[in-house]
Image (spheres, rainbow, N blue to C red):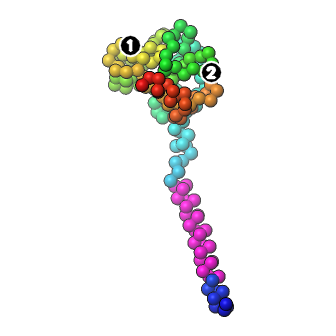
Amino acid sequence: MSNQTNRRDFIGYSFAAVAAVGGAASLVGMKQVWDPLPSVLAGGFTKFDLSTLKAGEPEVITWRGKPIFVLKKTKEMEASERDLVIGEDRFTVVIGLCTHLGCIPAWKKTMWKCACHGGEFTPSAKNVFGPPPRPLDLAPFSVSGTTITLGEDGPEYQKMLKAVI
Ligand code: FES
């Protein structure tokens, strides 16, 4: 093997090494551009601790710009296949947009009432009066202890979906 050959090999390996490092750096740069920003990722999920709720007093939280109704049911409120059951407690977790034309119903003592055209929904979010064609839609979530993460497709949510279809 001549000196000339060794020199050519060395130059070839050097170019290959530079090209490999450059290619890897380019891939890292492209991944950073393609991946959603952390603020965007965080915006897709909302956590809420259901243990902070008082029975019979729903709260409205926001997930991806939508109102989400969360209600801890009282013992007197009817059980439903749409309930999230944690221990002894039953919860309603639904998207708070009327299924008629999208107004936001308000809680009136024992049910949600829609001011737009008079639609009414039970504590299980079932439509019982007025023009709404169906119950309030379920919001996708997962559960860990008493905390729900809206935006995740957990097994409890899947079970509720199957029960109501
Ligand atoms: S939008 Fe609620 S009843 Fe029409």
Residue at left 47%, top 23%?
Answer: 163
- Across and down, in percent, residue 15 comes to 59, 77
- Across and down, in percent, residue 103 comes to 38, 23
Q: Nearer the viewer, mark 1 or mark 2?
A: 1
Is residue 142 something one can see in this rendering?
yes
Choose between 111 and 126: the one closer to the eye. 126
What residue would you read off at disc 1? 128
Please rate how many residues cluster around mark 1, counting C-alpha atoms within 10 Å: few if below 14, some from 14 to 19, many from 20.
Answer: some
Looking at the picture, does residue 49 appear above or below residue 5?
Answer: above
Looking at the rendered structure, which numbered label has been put on residue 51? 2
Q: Decide if residue 122 is on the left or right side of residue 87.
A: left
Choose between 79 and 63: the one closer to the eye. 79
Q: Is residue 16 magenta?
A: yes
In which quadrant of the rendered view does residue 131 lie? Answer: top left
Residue at left 39%, top 16%?
Answer: 127
Is residue 62 something one can see in this rendering?
no
Please rate how many residues cluster around mark 2, counting C-alpha atoms within 10 Å: few if below 14, some from 14 to 19, many from 20.
Answer: few
Choose between 53 and 134: the one closer to the eye. 134
In which quadrant of the rendered view does residue 114 lie? Answer: top left
| Gap in angstroms between the C-alphas marked 1 and 2 | 28 Å
Residue at left 59%, top 29%?
Answer: 143
Looking at the picture, does residue 41 appear above or below residue 83?
Answer: below
Task: Name the amino acid, label 2.
Answer: Ser
- Across and down, in percent, residue 74 comes to 55, 11
For the record, the magenta segment spans: 10-33
Q: Is residue 105 magenta?
A: no
